[in-house]
Amino acid sequence: VATAATTSASTEPRSQTDLLSDLVLWLQNLGASGLDGLSVAESPLPHRGRVVFAKRDFELGEELCKVPAAAILAVPSHGPEDNVGDGAEVSLAKALLNERHLGARSRLAPYIASLPAEGQLPLTHPLFWPQDLCLKELFAGSVHGQRVAAEVLKVGAAHVEALLSSRAAVNESEARWASAIVETRAFTFQPDTDQEQLALVPFLDMLNTFSLLRDGEALWQCSFEAEGPASEGASLVVDRPIRQNQEVLHVYSSNS
């Protein structure tokens, strides 16, 4: 018979460390490889959140890690193009919300639990900008910047409305959460083909992405292998040597 103390403890929210441990164990039980050589911790830099570090050295050409298909949530990228509310981003957000609403019954429950909650997402993302924000003031020196920002806000609003009108999201806050998760974390498999897919890939989506050079040197060390379908799993391959305790960064491209 459970005591009051054990009953109370079982209902307490789990720490983020415990949730991440659950995520890694779940992935390994599904057949993920390479995760023993990686760790997740808070970035020493502000506003970077959780990032991935190397626990050992990795050399050029190594497979950094691989996530099996059973852990991936994917949707076809191709569909009606005349309505932004029918696009792959909305389809993937709907699929994500469906798994979230299933709770412990979801096949992706450990992944859903590990994702940042609504209040933990960065307020710098356009989906969370104040509604009374004046773009002309924010981008006072750039008409082009005003136009780009206005288009981003328009698309974001259309995605939120599509999730609400379809009842995929229970409220606007949840719709914005799902849209932001997809926009900031999704990967593209088989880009620019008829088989293109948009997908959420647990663990891989915690790596920061860069496409920048500094003094002619690339800032990333690995890249996403996107040629195959999501049904074959998702891999990161080392493009440049990674040293123990370095943050692991993957190249930002059309695939992510």
Image (cartoon, rainbow, N blue to C red):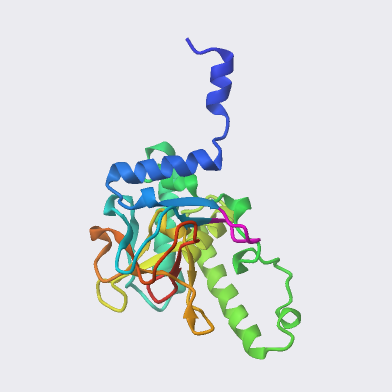
Residue at position x 68%, y 89% in the image: 142
Vertical arrangement, residue 7 with respect to residue 53, above or below: above
Horizontal arrangement in the rendering, residue 70 relative to residue 256 (left or right): left
Q: Position of residue 155 (x, y in %)?
A: 53, 73
Residue 95 visible at all? yes
The magenta segment: 42-50
Which residue reaches farthest right?
137
Residue at position x 36%, y 42% in the image: 26
Vertical arrangement, residue 75 with respect to residue 78, above or below: above
Q: Position of residue 88 (x, y in %)?
A: 39, 68
- Which picture quadrant has residue 173? bottom right
Which residue reaches farthest top?
1
Q: Is residue 139 magenta?
A: no
Horizontal arrangement in the rendering, residue 80 relative to residue 15 (left or right): left
- Which picture quadrant has residue 54? bottom left
Q: Is residue 46 magenta?
A: yes
* The one of 243 and 104 positioned closer to us in this rendering: 243
* The one of 211 and 205 positioned closer to us in this rendering: 211
Q: Main secondary structure of the magenta part?
A: loop
Q: Quadrant of the C terminus?
A: bottom left
Residue at position x 56%, y 59% in the image: 176
Q: Position of residue 12 (x, y in %)?
A: 58, 30
Residue at position x 74%, y 85% in the image: 140
Q: Position of residue 72 (x, y in %)?
A: 33, 55
* The one of 213 and 160 positioned closer to us in this rendering: 213
- Which picture quadrant has residue 192? bottom left
Number of marks drawn: 0
Residue 102 visible at all? no
